[in-house]
Image: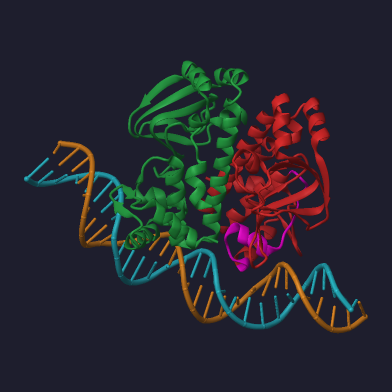
Chain colours: A green, B red, C orange, D cyan
DNA sequence: ATTATATTGTAAAATATTTTACATTTTTAT
DNA sequence: ATAAAAATGTAAAATATTTTACAATATAAT
């Protein structure tokens, strides 16, 4: 099932027809963010949908000690902020730009009006949301049933697969460790082992997935 | 945020207007299941939406050793099977009836046709899906950042809150331990402590949430 | 009622992970 | 270029959790 992840994580925009795209483009407020810039604060309650157009966005929670606990990475065509629109919740996460990033900001009411006239906007959002659901369930399954090494590997696969953006994962080990709910030394040795197995390469502030296919197969072979 | 959980976990059916309800009722195939009966197998790929009408349904994975790893419990008005309809995935979970249960089964194509004429069916499904997303994120957060006792307590709150069905949780400790990704003895001692704190009562094959409010507050007070 | 089975409680030994500490490496700032 | 800061690698001690084992309790079967 893990091998299907990349295929089913289709970006929102890629699911829309041209007319929907045009309508969105006309309504959107394009915003540019620099590397590391905070796009949204957890707790913000101005409703709106955001769509990544280029670059990459990191979704997570900034802890008081500065560690960034990653929930997911979003690439071009992917969305965030749905909660604020349809579940009447404030932003549940901090959103940070990774590299130069262009984001379409769609104010809540404006997007809801568009939905009435463009029939595919809502179903596509539902598809996106359901796939994310599935991804989260896989993450939970990794956390509760896999030993450290496999847990690290599977989480890497999931985070990289859903971003759909290259195989370079920019993160400090301390952040990834917090994301995985383990200590940095434990993660560090796990990553060392994965490098020994030629599945990844470690760098300063980044992890390179040398061979996504092999890593996926390696995980699948020892998952459930 | 945990205190809001019960309020935002509004069952799908409760979000619909009467006309939608009527349309659903006319199209649904009512099915009765006895306690413990398997409603769906993981892997089934006949697409369809299922709606709990009465009773309770357990969503999870039955492991080869027989343990049931719970993902969630669904009460009246709540749905499952969306994946098969909108994400082209087979059933990702085993679904088991808890007590006498009535379920409306809606074959895929039939439901999709209904969506075209009943405008609220899809948005309500989106709302449901987004809330479930949020719940899963809270579960993940519990697993990665909370110590055992708090992790157990928070997971109990989440599972009970989303079911919206009383405060009696029928489960073997071995199943709940697998759900939490910990050993049964560890869970056992944690439950004992929670009982000492007058937050729950333990039974044979069940856990009673004596005071949902207090339990929620206790968790919130030591959660981030 | 009685026996058998399933589940829970709990302790000790074995194991895994965290914590702490510090050396090493890489990047950033001057 | 050099110094300072940040991040990573890694080992030892401290701690937590699992494993294993068995007793106690509750339910189911006869």
Q: Quadrant of residue B26?
A: top right
| Residue at x-position 42% and y-position 40% | A164
Determine which quarter of the picture holds residue A114.
top right
Give, as a single range, the part of the protein colored magenta.
B164-185
Q: Position of residue A24 (x, y in %)?
A: 50, 20
Residue B128 in the image, given as x and y percentages of width and height: 66, 36
Task: Choose top left, top right, bottom left or bottom right for residue D18.
Answer: bottom right
Q: Nearer the viewer, residue D27 or B104?
A: B104
Residue at 81% x, 26% y: name it.
B18
Does B31 sit above or below residue A151?
above
**Could you tell whether A223 is left or right of A213 in the image?**
right
**Left or right, residue D16 beside residue A122:** left
Query: Farthest top residue?
Result: A26
Instruction: Let me know if residue B168 is in the magenta part.
Output: yes
Q: Is residue A60 magenta?
A: no
Q: Which of the image's four quarters has the C terminus of chain A?
A: bottom right
Vertical position of residue D24 compared to residue A94: above or below = below
* Residue A209 placement (x, y as % from top left): 35, 51
Residue B213 visible in this rendered orientation of the protein: no
Residue A118 visible at all = yes
Seen at 60% across and 45% down, the residue is B89
Return the x and y of residue A17 as percentages of the image width and height. 52, 25
Residue at 47% from the left image edge and 48% from the top image edge: A158
Q: Nearer the viewer, residue B122 or C19?
A: B122
């Amino acid at each position: 099932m893990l091998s299907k992840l990349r295929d089913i994580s289709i970006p929102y925009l890629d699911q829309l027809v041209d007319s929907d795209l045009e309508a969105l483009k006309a309504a959107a407020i394009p915003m540019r963010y620099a590397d590391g810039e905070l796009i949204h604060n957890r707790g913000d309650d101005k409703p709106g949908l955001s769509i990544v157009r280029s670059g990459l966005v990191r979704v997570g929670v900034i802890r008081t000690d500065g560690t960034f606990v990653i929930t997911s990475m979003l690439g071009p065509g992917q969305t965030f902020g749905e909660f604020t629109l349809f579940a009447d919740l404030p932003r549940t996460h901090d959103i940070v730009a990774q590299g130069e990033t262009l984001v379409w900001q769609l104010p809540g009411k404006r997007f809801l009006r568009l939905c009435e006239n463009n029939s595919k906007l809502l179903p596509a959002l539902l598809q996106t949301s359901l796939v994310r659901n599935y991804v989260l369930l896989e993450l939970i399954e990794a956390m509760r049933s896999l030993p450290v090494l496999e847990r690290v590997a599977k989480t890497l696969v999931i985070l990289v697969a859903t971003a759909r953006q290259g195989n370079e994962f920019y993160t400090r080990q301390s952040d990834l460790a917090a994301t995985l709910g383990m200590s940095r030394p434990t993660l560090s040795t796990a990553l060392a082992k994965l490098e020994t197995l030629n599945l990844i390469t470690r760098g300063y502030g980044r992890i390179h997935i040398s061979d996504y296919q092999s890593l996926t197969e390696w995980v699948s072979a020892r998952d459930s």
